[in-house]
């Protein structure tokens, strides 16, 4: 007859059977565990004998050790070996890591030295550029107060003995100097843009390739001209027939022959400037002709009282003569042709 699990009597029977099976299973497991424990105790209580037999006729020494003791000693020995092995491995790994760190530290030190050398080199280049920008900056209105504060008319600012060396400068200090130089260049840029037209029409081009042999204000008797008057311009020695170029845009005002200065060209420019070119061999322009900056107007000669081939170059502002040298590129006064 089939059991109906939904009937209460059948459910009670099923529960009793299940409890009985579990009890039997529990007793069986308990008995197995007791048997195993008894076997272990029996095995552990067994003894082994260690005998030490000397070569002499001394008494033999016996040691009786239970299996429990042997097991414990072997277990401790195994633990010691494992711990020692792990310690050695960990130490070896630590030593390798330390070696790697020392190698990395050496590489980083070399890289830092390379960076320092590169920064020092860039800073040296920057300082040279900044020193070259100072004269231009002093021409600006913002730089006039800077230049006026210098004593003795020196072009270069005095060296501050308390200024830090390149090695001691920090990145922040270098950055501040770069920012200050950037601001200075912006001032120069604005000044140059506002003065570009004036600069373009200022006599600034070197009129001939040569060397100055007589400076402005020197006695003309020292320049082989035979005259004892003061020079109102500069004598530029050049090769015969060298090209003479006009130093600024302008108009040919006059072409005359002078007993002292020979063939002479006068060019008028904007803003009251006039330039005068003397001792010419011949000219290539006409009176009233419009000229662009750098245009050829004649060739170097030895006319008038010139004792050698040269160009006497003058700059006149209104009725006053100015020293041409500040308007021209720098050139050695001591060099000769």
Image: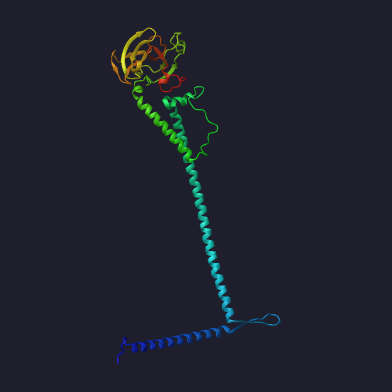
Residue 316 occupies quadrant: top left
What is the residue that sits farthest to the right in this orientation?
57
Which one is in front, 93 or 285?
A: 93
* Residue 100 horizontal/vertical position (percent): 50, 55
Residue 15 visible in the current orientation: yes
What is the residue that sits farthest to the bottom in this orientation?
1
Left of 15 or right of it: where is 85? right
Q: Residue at x 58, y 84 (%)?
A: 45
Q: Residue at x 53, y 59 (%)?
A: 95
What is the residue that sits farthest to the top in this orientation?
259
* Residue 312 horizontal/vertical position (percent): 40, 14
Judge whether 263 appears above or below 44 on screen: above
Residue 122 visible in the current orientation: no
Q: Residue at x 48, y 85 (%)?
A: 30
* Residue 265 horizontal/vertical position (percent): 34, 13
Quadrant occupied by the N terminus: bottom left
* Residue 162 horizontal/vertical position (percent): 55, 33
Which one is in front, 248 or 305?
A: 248
Left of 281 or right of it: where is 160? right
Q: Residue at x 55, y 84 (%)?
A: 41
Judge whether 17 appears above or below 182 on screen: below
**Colour scheme in use:** rainbow
Numbered disc total: 0
Quadrant occupied by the C terminus: top left
Which one is in front, 239 or 207?
A: 207
Left of 57 or right of it: where is 172? left
Residue 130 occupies quadrant: top left
Which one is in front, 211 or 217?
A: 217
Judge whether 198 appears above or below 123 on screen: above
Left of 46 or right of it: where is 122? left
Judge whether 10 appears above or below 145 on screen: below
């Amino acid at each position: 007859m089939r059991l109906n699990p939904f009937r209460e009597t059948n459910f009670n029977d099923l529960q009793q059977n299940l409890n009985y099976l579990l009890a039997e299973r529990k007793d069986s497991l308990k008995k197995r565990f007791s048997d195993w424990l008894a076997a272990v105790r029996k095995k552990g209580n067994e003894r082994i004998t260690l005998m030490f037999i000397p070569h002499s006729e001394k008494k033999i020494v016996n040691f009786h050790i239970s299996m429990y003791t042997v097991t414990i000693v072997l277990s401790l020995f195994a633990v010691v070996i494992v711990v020692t092995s792990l310690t050695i491995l960990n130490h070896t790994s630590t030593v390798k890591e330390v070696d790697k760190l020392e190698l990395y530290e050496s590489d980083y030190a070399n890289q830092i030295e390379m960076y320092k050398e590169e920064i020092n080199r860039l800073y040296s280049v920057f300082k040279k550029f900044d020193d070259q920008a100072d004269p231009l900056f002093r021409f600006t209105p913002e730089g006039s107060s800077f230049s006026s504060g210098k004593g003795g008319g020196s072009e270069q600012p005095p060296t501050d003995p308390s200024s830090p060396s390149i090695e001691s400068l920090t990145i922040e200090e270098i950055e501040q100097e770069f920012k200050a130089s950037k601001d200075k260049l912006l001032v120069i840029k604005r000044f140059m843009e506002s003065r570009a037209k004036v600069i373009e029409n200022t006599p600034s081009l070197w009129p001939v390739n040569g060397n100055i042999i007589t400076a402005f204000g020197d006695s003309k008797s020292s320049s082989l001209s035979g005259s004892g008057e003061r020079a109102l311009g500069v004598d530029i020695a050049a090769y015969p027939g060298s090209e003479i170029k006009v130093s600024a845009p302008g108009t040919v005002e006059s072409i005359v022959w002078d007993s002292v200065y020979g063939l002479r060209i006068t060019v008028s420019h904007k803003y009251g400037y006039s330039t005068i070119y003397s001792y010419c061999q011949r000219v290539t322009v006409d009176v009233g002709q419009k000229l662009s900056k750098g245009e050829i107007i004649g060739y170097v000669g030895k006319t008038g009282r010139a004792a050698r081939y040269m160009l006497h170059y003058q700059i006149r502002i209104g009725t006053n003569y100015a020293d041409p040298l500040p308007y021209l590129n720098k050139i050695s006064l001591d060099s000769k042709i």
